[in-house]
Image: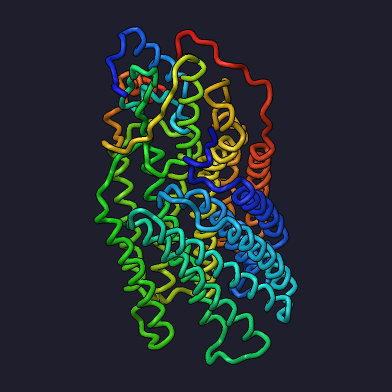
Amino acid sequence: MEAQNLPDDFGLEVYETLKYIIDPEVGINIVDLGLIYEVSLTDEGVLAVDLTLTTPGCPMSGTIRTAAEQILLKRFPTLDVKINLVWSPPWTTDMISEEGMRQLDGKM
Amino acid sequence: MSTATTSNSPGKWVVLPHYAFAALAFVALSVLLLFSTDAFNGHYFHPKLLTLTHVAALGWATMLVFGALYQLLPVVLECKLYSEKLATIAFGFLGLGTILLAWSFWNFELGWPMHVAACSLVISFILFNINVVQTARKAPKWTIESDFIVTSAIWLLVTGLVGLLMAINFTMPFLPVDHTHYLKLHAHIGMAGWFLLLIIGVGSKLIPMFLLAHHDETKKLNWSYNLINAGLVLFIADHLLFQTSLLPVYAVVVIAGVVLFLLFLRDAAKTRQRQDLDLGMKQTFVALALLLLPLILVLVVSSKLGLPQSLLSSIYLVYGISVFLGFISALILGQTFKTLPFIVWMHAYEDYVGRFKTPMPKDMYSHTLLRWQNISYLLGFILLIAGVLLRNELIILGGAIGFTITSLLYTANVFRMMMHKVHDLKPFTYGSAKSA
């Protein structure tokens, strides 16, 4: 199984879809929070997403992982979706996007 | 796909009954306070004050800490809770012990009900210790937070054992010195060994997490752990064996440990990405500010300053109030709204996320009730402290009313969350995704 480069618009669509998943504690979507490390598509039609969490013991791990899987399956029903929970490199606040920082500043 | 395989969280029936019991205990505590305004004019060894203290320490604070810890232990230690069954049994014994003990103190019935209560509590603490230690043993790495949490559980058991000995001593005297001597030991092991160490252990992980702060330096926490335990052990040894006049020195050692924890939080806060604080976090910082009061008062009560006896008695009472109804209660009133909404949300919506638009945890409680809860709490606390210092029953009653309002607002919000039902979810329609 070999990963291939994602067509630009497809990759964008995956990230846009994942933006529907909001981290319930922070209130920012998981893409802008910097939790998505990598997205790839294999020749066999497996859409793989490397996802991390803000802390290894996060109680929302199952919920966020399932949410990402469910939403991608719904958006891309012909693909197999595989969500890999990864811890390396550890998530830091430097990974929050500019948009995420803007949202954080305007929150609450 | 089941989420059970990827989440370490325990079932909701392990955690939620603790929150429900604690909320009702807080209401009971406040109502009892309304009928205890006459008890604050003398010594702290008074049936009504003993009732209030134990309802606060056990039914309110320890009950909530147990429930929250079963949820947070997997977060802090990064592994599943050792046994949900043990947790449920410990809940039963803690509930039974608290109710019986409160009844015994209020009626000053020192016979078998108090013995059964004390035994129930010790059994509960033993089961809790087994659960905490075994969970910590499964943790992928041993951290300073593990040290704090495991040690606090051991101190809780020691507190319970001293309490059990005192309960037996009421009817079958065997202890060589009078009760107040052991009461000081019992109270300080509970306050510094159990509550303080536990709050630091969990707080040092959670508060930076809630602030989105990354701060991995643990040197201050290591020293905080060493100093608090050293101060406590020295105090116990001195109090039991030597009775020197070095108590203020031990107090300073413990205070230095707490200050290091506060400095750790300050360092973490400097790196935080979240600038605005929600009401739960604001209340948490109020609690940390209130922590300064018992830190100052412990120096006053441990030093021989030659204060008039009546003033000293009032200061002793304010000291106890500042710990249980000040720091600890303020912290619970804030942190409940950082933990419970997520627990309820997770169990309610884990099967819907990613397929339907779901509300956020912060939408599950009333922010208006929470705001008024925080206001009435602070007013109630200030009035109670002022009333006790001035020995004015009317002002104390004002404080008790403040606490009663606070407890009702808190309980209304807690039950509102716990009775939350999923309804009318709309499936996602794709367009341009916006953050909440």
Asked if residue A34 lies left or right of residue B370, the reply is: left
Asked if residue B343 lies left or right of residue B142, the reply is: right
Give how far across and how far down residue B110 sits, in percent.
Answer: 71, 80
> Residue, x 69% and y 52% (percent of image)?
B24
- Please determine whether, in this image, residue B273 is positioned above or below residue B339: above
Asked if residue B73 lies left or right of residue A92, the reply is: right
> Residue, x 56% and y 36% (percent of image)?
B346
Q: Quadrant of residue B60?
A: bottom right
Q: Quadrant of residue B219?
A: bottom left
Q: Which of A10 and A55 is in front in this view?
A: A10
Q: Which of A37 and B168 is in front in this view?
A: A37
Give how far across and how far down residue B90 sits, in percent.
Answer: 61, 63
> Residue, x 38% and y 17% (percent of image)?
A15
Asked if residue B237 lies left or right of residue B226, the reply is: right
- Please determine whether, in this image, residue B122 is positioned above or below residue B322: below
Whether residue B334 is visible, yes or no, is yes
> Residue, x 40% and y 88% (percent of image)?
B241
Give how far across and how far down residue A43 sits, in percent.
Answer: 33, 17
Q: Which of B58 and A88 is in front in this view?
A: A88
Total of numbered circles in the picture?
A: 0
Its colouring scheme is rainbow
